[in-house]
Amino acid sequence: MAIRDETRMLLESMTRLFQDHCTKQVADAAETGVFPRSLWDAVAETGVPLAALPESAGGADAEWSDLYAALRVAARFSAPIPLAETMLAGWAAASCGLETSDGPMTVGPVRTADKLTLERDGNGWRLAGVATRIPYASFASRTVLIADGPDGEMAVAFDGTGGAELTPGRNIANESRDTLTFNNIRLSADQAAPVKSGVSRAALYRRGALARATMMSGALEKAMDLAVNYAQDRQQFGRPISKFQAVQQNLAVLAGQTAAAVAAANLGIQALSDADPEREQFFIAVAKTRVGEAATLACEIAHQVHGAIGFTKEYALQLSTRRLWSWREEFGGDPEWAARVGAYACMRGEADLWPMLTDR
Amino acid sequence: MVTPTFRFDPVEIPPEAEELRKEVRAFIKEHEHLMGFSRSSFNRDFSRAMGKKGWIGMTWPKQYGGHERTSFERYVMIEEMLVAGAPLSAHYTGDRQSGPNLLRFGTEEQKNDFLPRIAAGELTFCIGMSEPNSGSDLAGTRTRAVKVDGGYKINGTKLWTSNAHRADYAILFCKMSGKGEEEPDRHAGATQFLLDLKLPGIDIRPVINLLGEHHFNEIFLTDVFVPDDRLLGKEGNGWNQVTSELSFERSAPDRFLVLFQMLREMIRMAGPEPDKATAAALGKLISQLATLRSMSISIAGMLQEGLNPNNEAAVVKDLGTRYEQDIPVVARQLFPTEPELEAIDLYTSMIARSTMNAPRFSIQGGTREILRGIIARGLGLR
């Protein structure tokens, strides 16, 4: 009823693709700083990274809900590629009439405190400021940023990192998170455009937060899968540890948190296609808040069930949990988003609390 | 992946069910003087008024007094009532589980006799499961039925029976004498009866709860004669039936909306511009609530499709009771007060009531441990 056949088929084909191309070896190798080119090429081949764009811009007019669902699948496999970033970069650039790229793209700023300014320079522009922890900037074939222009927000897009000074960095899953410093970099007129069609810094931040929440729901599904299977395989005291009630009760909590994370991410995704921007903001904030809470509880249990083996580099659990601990904080952690949910509810007042949750 | 995952599809409430929401809200406004802090209030007049509206037995067939409406419409009606604190107690058990159980296992005569009266808000049911020595271990029931001429003679004791002192009927869970005494066949002989609580041999005594209130009871059954036509379903099929009844009980949204008014009061107290820590604490609760609600709507969708969301219902109840137990904990941290039941200040009386009520949330309708056991079974661990 709720999941369309097209979506199901897309998810099945994405699952097969990642099964074939995103092995633990690929994820391990990516942590040494090697971009998994063949994985990226296989994903790009499907057209999914740019599928949300209109057909005129090389996309497929796909539903965002399908793309987010694809992100969830990619995250189950800990895919070390900027799939979410490329989707968002494509959306931001194409919506504002800027060029996109077939290669991996990145997008920013990803932090509210960062400031980028764009000033006129003859026909073109000069870009100044710092964009910290831009995902996969080192490997991006194109970068799309939102900067403050003289008359409001502007989208800028350039190949590579456009002459920025790049300081490499990484999150605790060893995914590249690089800082770009723009020292009055000159851009041509066609590399910048006023934002439109719903693109804004705030909208980018929200969609980024929702992407992370959705990816976290996929990583949680993987962690749960590993924990449940491990508990059934691992023998202690002469039987599988899954036969112990204490372990069963923990796994039940893990399953509940995972289910809640998936449901919360879906709430945000549902609101994304909503006409009401306040609803979108509210439910995305709800999603990042609830998924963050789930991740904290679930990682603890997944590791507890695994015992020492889960703490090793060799065993795959850490591919999921290190991502969860990283993504939990990216595009704002759950305390920040919870404060937004609470502040909004309080601003609306207690009489509006129920209508906020129910009315469309 | 090989692990069975629980199904919470993103489901949206269809527009016709949303239409009903307006009607329910108008009805609540009309009866505003009857709204309270929770659904536990008992008011037969209100139940009859709801029956007239067609809001009891909403999804049941029309031939039995039902209204053949969707699970979504029922969901919308119930959540609005719960949030308003409507006095649902006189019909809630009948609507939620006794009626559906009758519909599934009752004879034509029973369905014709009982269901229209439940749907009209005329008949109050209570649950006859727990006993002094059989709580979570329902199969350990010691109440016994013996076949006699024209019916059954029943002896035993039921405990923690909410509303027994005001109800007309209980669905009694027991075993046939001499059956199901030992493993591996402890479910053998389990049987359910439609028990008229006015029958001779029934003695109902109050058990006062820690709030000093009389909600639950102990029911003593001494040689109670129940006629053949009040056997529910089949003799010996009681385990299957009671499991089904429990899944009806657990899939209702009342496991996370009981303290909604307290959350609302906390938002009022925080004011329009709370500090960040207060906003975050409230935002976390609201995010939990929004998520629980969406999961519950998914369950309504599964019910509408005729699926059995038993595992999903256990997940929602487990998460929902945790959330509800957190509300008074967060409240006392944000807005400290010395709890007092009779306080004139609404919040102070709410925190008193919710703090004292909190323990029961994760006990009634299946303890937290039992629910997690169900979830673990759903994961293939048991």
Image (spheres, rainbow, N blue to C red):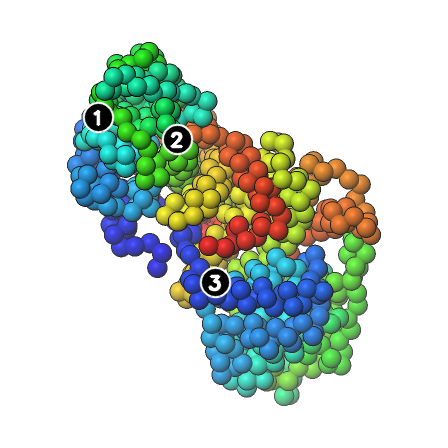
Compared across the picture, whether B356 is left or right of B134 comes to: right
Q: CA distance from mark 3 to mark 1?
A: 48 Å
Q: Secondary structure at mark 3?
A: helix
Task: Report the chain holding disc 2.
Answer: A
Q: Residue at x 35, y 24 (%)?
A: A149
Q: Position of residue A239 (x, y in %)?
A: 46, 40
Q: Which residue is mark 3?
A: B18
Q: Amino acid at mark 1?
A: Asp
Q: Secondary structure at mark 2?
A: helix
* Label 2 crowd (10 A; few <14 / some 14-19 / many >=20): many
Compared across the picture, whether A267 is left or right of A125 comes to: right
Q: Residue at x 51, y 54 (%)?
A: A358
Q: CA distance from mark 2 to mark 1?
A: 20 Å
Asked if badges 2 and 3 are on one and the same chain, I answer no
Q: Which residue is mark 1?
A: A190
Residue B334 vertical placement versus B241 (above, below): above
Q: Amino acid at mark 3?
A: Glu
Q: Amino acid at mark 2?
A: Arg
Q: Which residue is mark 2?
A: A201
* Label 1 crowd (10 A; few <14 / some 14-19 / many >=20): some
Q: CA distance from mark 2 to mark 3?
A: 34 Å
Q: Position of residue A5 (x, y in %)?
A: 27, 55
Asked if badges 3 and 1 are on one and the same chain, I answer no
Q: Residue at x 69, y 82 (%)?
A: B225
Q: Nearer the viewer, residue A184 or B212?
A: A184
The quadrant of the picture occupied by the N terminus of chain B is top left
Q: Nearer the viewer, residue B373 or A58?
A: A58
Looking at the image, tell me whether mark 2 or mark 1 is earlier in sequence order: 1
Q: Position of residue A342 (x, y in %)?
A: 57, 39
